[in-house]
Amino acid sequence: MPRSQGSPDRPQLSRDRVLRAAVAVADGGGLGGLTIRSLALQLDVKPMSVYYYVANKSEILDGIVDLVFAEIELPTPGGEWRAEISKRAHSAREVLRRHPWAIALMESRTNPGPATLRHHDAIVGTFRLAGFSVPLAAHAYALLDAFVYGFALQETSLPFESSEDAAEVTGAMMEHFASGQYPHLTELATDHVLQPGYAFGDEFDFGLDLILDGLARSLPAS
Amino acid sequence: MPRSQGSPDRPQLSRDRVLRAAVAVADGGGLGGLTIRSLALQLDVKPMSVYYYVANKSEILDGIVDLVFAEIELPTPGGEWRAEISKRAHSAREVLRRHPWAIALMESRTNPGPATLRHHDAIVGTFRLAGFSVPLAAHAYALLDAFVYGFALQETSLPFESSEDAAEVTGAMMEHFASGQYPHLTELATDHVLQPGYAFGDEFDFGLDLILDGLARSLPAS
DNA sequence: AGTCTCACCGTACTAAGTACGGCGAGCGTA
DNA sequence: TACGCTCGCCGTACTTAGTACGGTGAGACT
């Protein structure tokens, strides 16, 4: 049998277990809640044990970003491009909603892992095989990802999801609105966002469709 | 004369001076370089003096986000909407390039200051006065800001700006490319991004125009 | 039996946020 | 002039977090 340390009924540590635990901690307590000590607690080991599998915290951050990318459904190059791109856009948005802390990380981390590279390759490939020229694929790719990440960014910075949640939160802002200094914002809030049935997430499809329409139009007629 | 403490030739501290110094420190050393101690050093006072003007570090972060928003040129509601929106989009991108750390902050901070609210009000107002319905203004606003923030996010996470810079950086990635695992990414890099004259920033206008075209089309004919 | 290595940990140093209580300078009042 | 108040700034010290450095016991190999 292998060396298999791992005290009573705790599986042996591994880089993978460390990273998965880090994702779990971040999901639960945000990036701020992810410390070496909280991570060790989650893994049921002592803090310094973590350093046997990763060099430092930065490596953990790089690692969990790549884990998140791996969760996003890839488009299939060669398939119907609109459907494929739309599928992965929705998947990306969903994943980023599950791991909101990941958005902020992508900003500072400039150390793409394999899943990240695979991801980008599939997207560019989907555009190219659909007849996009190289420059047009670059345009499309930049635009699409700007939208997806930007939307996710807005979504997590919004302190509410539905009109009911919104009602709660806007209480504090109401004094501002009442001052009459922000008439258009007030109108938007009271006549639209605070109406029953409003969900910010619904704005996603409007934007995505508009972008896909625009891209389709910029393709030379097939 | 006023109490005017402020030791030899150092102007008196103030909340405003604290926040402006914080922006300067963040510009120079990123968010990570902004500590109470580095801030105090910049202000030529001792760390605890800062706490006479702000309650805690979180308040500093909220404050500098609002300072950044204040730098963005506002659109003028009632003007030609395409020109106005385009102007502020370019201004926002430029400001976020000057203060890249601000993007990450907007994610975690949910405490809008006056400049932030004024900003949003002007944008919604510009759409409304141009004939956009309330729901359409909401769509347009969400889409546009997703694009602007998302683009800025990509731009700062890119470790290069021009094709020359790119050549430097991709050295480390070249081994990945050489493996043949990422053919489309390799094509994009070698045939386009690494060509002289390429600048990622140029993708901005393509995306912005596509979005504005789409929005114009969704407006009922005037 | 002796040695090696793996997996994990104890101790301790450093950086950073910040609670708490000074403390001098100048002003108000008498 | 004397007393005391408040303003603006600071010294000390506690806490949390990253992590360098050097163990240390358990099994494997010789």
Image: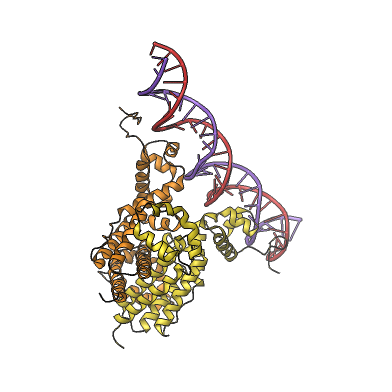
Chain colours: A yellow, B orange, C purple, D red
Numbered disc total: 0
Q: From the viewer's perspective, tell me whether residue D6 is left or right of residue B95.
A: right
Nearer to us in this view, C6 or A201: A201
Kindly identify the residue that appears in the image at 39 percent across and 39 percent down.
B41
Can you say whether B144 is above or below A125 in the image? Answer: above
Q: Quadrant of the C terminus of chain B?
A: bottom left
Q: Quadrant of the N terminus of chain B?
A: top left
Kindly identify the residue that appears in the image at 28 percent across and 58 percent down.
B74
* Most distant residue in the bottom direction: A222
- The x, y position of residue A162, in whole percent, is 49, 66
Nearer to us in this view, A190 or B150: A190
- The x, y position of residue B95, in whole percent, is 31, 56
Kindly identify the residue that appears in the image at 49 percent across and 73 percent down.
A72
Can you say whether B95 is above or below B58 in the image? Answer: below
- The x, y position of residue A107, in whole percent, is 41, 61
Nearer to us in this view, B16 or A123: B16
Can you say whether B199 is above or below C28 in the image? Answer: below
Q: Can residue A41 be seen in the rendering of this structure?
A: yes
Res B142 quadrant in image? bottom left
- The x, y position of residue A156, in whole percent, is 46, 62
Res A29 quadrant in image? bottom right
Q: Can residue B96 be seen in the rendering of this structure?
A: no
Q: From the viewer's perspective, tell me whether residue A60 is left or right of residue B133.
A: right
